[in-house]
Amino acid sequence: MDKRKIILDCDPGHDDAVAIMLAAINENIDLLGITVVTGNQTLEKTTNNALNICQYLGLDVPVFKGCPDPMIRPKFVAADIHGETGLDGPVFEPLTKKAEEQHAVLWMIDTIMKSDGDITVVTTGPMTNLGMAMRMEPAIVPKIKEIVLMGGAYTNGNVTPAAEFNIIEDADAAYVAFTSGRPITMVGLDVTRKALCYPAIVERMGKVGNKASKLFVDLMGHFCKSQKEVFGWEGGPLHDPITIAYLIDPSVITTKPMHCEIDIFSQQSLGRTNCDFFGYQKKEPNANVAIDIDVEKFWDMIEENIRKYN
């Protein structure tokens, strides 16, 4: 089986950290590089978090620093969930791994242009880097194999009643991606809210007893606590790694083709992913939208891959 070549564009973030871990450990994923964007925290902090994760796990993966602000609108961060550092909880050794000199957007353009059209771009944060890359060099668009994103919802948001964080943070960049004509798989809150990391799950992963296992437990300690404080649920939903789980085994989620439009015009519903679930508009679907998840299979995949770490 050929490895799936991916660029992981993220804003670590506890769930992004688990996505990095899953992508780097699994033998069927070829993680070409990690591009970082502002989102869960400021760019300096999210970049340091990506570097800390790679250093802690001993990952020989280049990290590229990307856009510090959304394409047009002011930025905001999710410190209420991810803390002051954006990755509160784990304690890391002094950071020696450094980000690459090249800007993330330029590296993304260069890498996709040199490819054979076999690179999937996975975004688990705001889509700023990808949107900027598409605008700066439109020739990359037909060479992107697939865009897989954690973002949006066809039901309820988590920042406003309408909008999910990654989309509303840079709705304009999401608009660029969703109107690009490339294959899109959207993993939104409708399924990620079903993957709740209950205390029993944390205990289960902790029993693996290796370095990746300890990191998972340390990450989820803070993440689940803040999720309960903000949203009231007992276990935090592990949003971002579901994108990687889908690439490893697509059967982990159920998708439905829909036409999806990003609201970039209204005030109350800015950032909403308007997914035409029932096909009212009679428009050609532009995204495969996740509508269900095999939760047991997902947690089995997380444990299986944590066990592979050595």
Image (tube, helix red, strand yellow):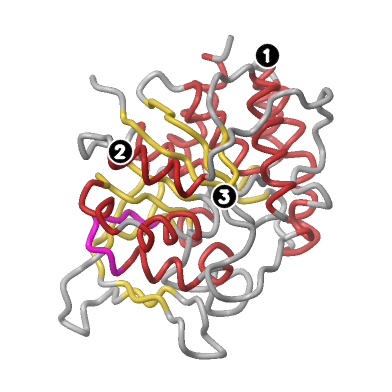
Q: Disc 3 and disc 1: Cα gap in Å? A: 32 Å
Mark positioned earlier in the residue sequence (3 or 2): 3
Q: Name the mark nearer the viewer: 2 or 1.
A: 2
Pick whichever, 167 or 96, lies toward us: 96
Q: Which of the marked residues, 2 or 1, is nearer the chain's N terminus?
A: 2
- Asked if residue 185 is among those painted magenta in the image, a careful observer would answer yes
Residue 87 sits above or below residue 288 on the image: above
Mark 3 Cα-neighbour bin, 10 Å: few <14, some 14–19, many ≥20: many
Under tag 1, what secondary structure? loop
Q: Residue at x 65, y 74 (%)?
A: 74
Q: Nearer the viewer, mark 3 or mark 2?
A: 3
For mark 2, give the secondary structure. Answer: strand
Task: Give me the residue at 28% from left, 50% from top.
Answer: 140
Residue 216 seen: no
Q: Position of residue 10 (x, y in %)?
A: 55, 47
Does the magenta stretch mainly form a helix, a strand or a loop? loop
**Which residue: 78% across, 54% down?**
226
Question: Residue 119 got which mark?
Answer: 2
Quadrant where the N terminus is found in the figure:
top left
Return the residue at label 1: 210
What are the residue bounds of the magenta stretch?
179-186
